[in-house]
Amino acid sequence: MDRNSAGISGQYTRSNNDFNRQDDHAASSRRVQYRHGTVEQWDNPFRTIPGRNEFYHFSDACPSQNLMFRSVNPAQDFNALIKQEIMDDLVSKSGRFGHRYDGRNHGQYASSIKKYTSTAKRPLNRAEQSQLMRLLQNFTATRSWNWRSLTTTLHSLTSAGVFTPHKPIDERVKRTQAALLSTLLEVIIFKCNQKPHARDIDAQGIANLLWAMAKLVDNGQERTPEFNMAVAALLPHVNAHKDQFIPQHIANLLWAMAKLVDYGQELTPGLKVTVAALLPHVEAQKNQFIPQEINNLLWSMAKLAGNGQEQIPELEEAVAVLLPHAIAQKDRFKPLDVANLLWAMAKLVDNGQEQTPEFNEAVAALLPQVNAQKNQFNPQHIANLLWAMAKLVDNGQQRTPVFNEAVAALLPHVNAQKNQFNPQHIVYLLWAMAKLVDNGLQRTPGFNEAVAALLPRVNAYKDRFNAQGITNLLWAMAKLVDNGPQRTPVFNEAVAALLPHVNAQKDQFKAQAVTNLLWAMAKLVDNRQEQIPELKKAAAALLPHVNTQKTQFIPRHITSLLWAMAKLVDNGQRQTPEFKETVAALLHRVNEEIEQFNAQGISNLLWAMAKLVDNEQERTPEIEEAVTALLPHVNTQKEQFIPQHIASLLWAMAKLVDNGQQRTPELSEALAALLPCVNAQKANLTPIANLLWAMAKLVDHGQEQTPEFNEAVTALLPHVKAQKNQCNAQDIANLLWAMAKLGELIELNVVTSTFKSLVDRISGNPQFSQQAILMSLWGVMVCCARLSLVPNTSKGNVLEKHMDDLFIRLENTSPDNEEDQRIIAMAASWLGRPCPVVPHYQTIVSKRQSDFRNQLHSCIPSLRIEEEKSLNSLPPVDLLLPDHNMAIEVQGPSHYVGGDFKTRKGSTLLKIALLQKAGFEVIEIPVNMLLSQDLMKPYIDQIKTRTSIPPQGHGSVSLKRRCADEAYVTADKGRQPSDHGYLTAEEHSDEQGGKPAKRKKTNIQ
């Protein structure tokens, strides 16, 4: 699959054996296509060295010889090959000449079988193979055979399909095949290990044998210990004869070694030496390779690279010298060649091949051939081509018009041939299409039809997908959903069909697969996939494997896993003990790999930790250590962060702080490093709601009002309106809350115009959660409060109408959260509605407040002063002068943005407006003006002047009730000093309609 996945990633798929079957690689110069493959003609074996493969003729004719010199008519008779007299003759010859018998007649007979299949244009079918095996029970190779007879026999029988296992397996046939193959391999090992003077080994025979042995495993034969010994015995002779190989030998040998490695042959030092010995001959003979050999060579090098062959200089040079020839011969490539070449180039790039101008030119030369030959591609070609194009794009290939045309040309054939794709094709096609979309390919109707055609096949083949297939499919489906398609019932069925197999095959998944699966499940859930029991079971089944394989996860895996687990929890996954244990195991790995994380990794990790903590993950020492370790890297990698990273990082830091993270110097430095990036990349930052929410939260927790912070806020505001149509319900709530929270930092006209553009999106929107409604209600209330505090302005009737609508939507709710209860109480007070809740306030009297109260009382002994009174279920007033309808608020730094004692926060403005609306004159005294009696004196003198006005009415507070509860609620002790607000003094003007007199705002200095 995309190893980025992905996201993760990932992108992270691996081309399977069945996806690049080179069934037409032979040692011969003439190839005959069969319905199921390609068989090599042996009657004129190689195109150079005339007479090289002629047979030795005995003077006496025999049935086996005669078969070689007559035309075999398939309709005329396969029976001619299975006459008992033929085998009797071979046994007789072998017996008569004994140790002097060189095996030539056996070789001739094997060649006649191959000639029959070549004429018939197909390998032996199951019935023919079964009949022939009865005869071959007595076919035995001996050490007296010469090299040519031995190589001819194995090559011919393999090409004809004598050793190909047919299903259902016939045990008698299987035993005969094994016995015959064993005798041939034993003689090959013997010949290869002879002393040099006794050998008759030649280059052509070496090439034919290794090709045949690769073909054996490609056709389904097992790699027995004897087979492996034969391969190992042949490899040194490749090196010894390297200067004698013609171009076709080189192509076939590299193909054979690639095939063997692809089927599990270990890349031993000996095999690596052999490959390295051949590669320089690719460059030396570059002008002599025909199109098919160019195809085979590039395919082989790609396969070797994909199976662990290092990108040695010789390999890179061999690729480089072949590319111009691929371009020059582009019009001679058949559909199979085109498919394999593009696959090979994609695979090479995926394993480190540099995309040089020549490489890109070769890709550009091949792409038009896809369109030109589109009607000739079979299902395997289509799968390979789309996989290759997806891989190329994922590794930086530009999506040119020609590239897009090639993809568009293939998509209708996915639909047309949907019933012919096998399980592996389905995996590769869906993976490729997900990768292409993830890299910007437009989702055309043709694309959507192709996806829709493949999804039912997932359900149909669900029991046939291996562990890698399940991983790639779930990754692909998660990516497809993440890039915009609707989740159809068929899509949901496909996901549901795959999930039980995650549990069933859980022990087969390696580290990367575990990562991709959890990432995919998190992505699906994040895109509204229902948390069905199968998904929860699949996630639970994988968690122990994260812990057991923790040392095998690379930094990218660690990032994706923590992101996935945070997403799952955020969407309802229970934090079981196993879950927490897995998180702890991964956090240790974060600290171990701290220097290896890139910019995206740092962003995702901090986001994940913030999400986990926000979902009740305990802030363990492991989390603290991981956060602390990551923060310095925010500063060092600040130039690498893209807009998405900046948004995620600011959100994460705000969330961490909101959940108790200390504002350490490292955190402050990280924030300082990010803020200039907000201004620099303001046009690309999304979602704007998260950014403003983060800035407001940071302010709420003591963020200083630095020039960089102010510039960042100013830079973001113009983009709110521009992005409003992209905002979902929660985004709108976040924006209203954040702009309200930032208070006077944002100009009032900007706030009101922005609010009016957003609130219309709220009314009647059923997607708003209770939390979003509460946040929006609070935000709109603050905006109305700001308007009410400014003389001669519209008092926000439109906004009050929206406030009323939001309040009605909460009428039947009973929130347990104290903060939510307070919002409802304040809204009820503002709107003059009965209050459905009795909010609970915890307060504490600060020392500065107590000192001022004492000083005030000593100066005006007759003045009745009450502390921490909650009026009409409103937040407690610091000091209440009930006989004069006057509230005194001692405002600490937490009531100002950045603690500057100038710029009031939204919460402070709301409290002042609510008190004024209830009929109180409000005097605000900044706490920094209460540091000494000299500083207090002007305030006390001003209050003396104010209280000289005779008290109204009943001699105590006259209130127009806004709530159904008592006028006064005694607040509990316990509020922190930081919860007090510190602003400026308010005066009221003339008394109207029986209400307490409203006075003009007065700043007491």
Image (spheres, helix red, strand yellow):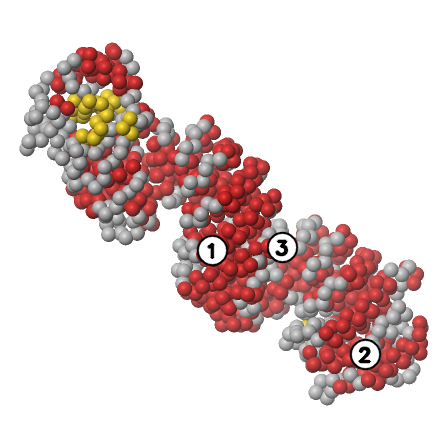
Nearest the eye: 798 or 37: 798
Q: Disc 1 residue type?
A: Leu
Q: Would residue 973 be found to the left or right of residue 427 on screen?
A: left
Q: Please identify, in this view, whether the residue under mark 1 or under mark 2 is nearer the observer.
A: 1
- Return the disc, 1 or 2, that comes first in the chain's sequence: 2
Tag 3, which secondary structure?
helix
Q: Disc 2 residue type?
A: Tyr
Q: Position of residue 995 (x, y in %)?
A: 9, 31
Which residue carries the number 3 mark? 348
Nearest the eye: 991 or 738: 991
Residue drawn at point x = 25 percent, y = 46 percent:
813
Which residue carries the number 2 mark? 109
Q: Please identify, in this view, whether the residue under mark 2 or under mark 3 is nearer the observer.
A: 2
Where is residue 820, by image quadrant?
top left
Residue drawn at point x = 87 percent, y = 79 percent:
91
Tag 2, which secondary structure?
helix
Q: Could you tell me if residue 784 is visible in this image?
A: yes
Which residue carries the number 1 mark? 535
What is the C-alpha distance between the residues marked 1 and 2?
A: 60 Å
Q: Please identify, in this view, whether the residue under mark 1 or under mark 3 is nearer the observer.
A: 1
Nearest the eye: 996 or 478: 996
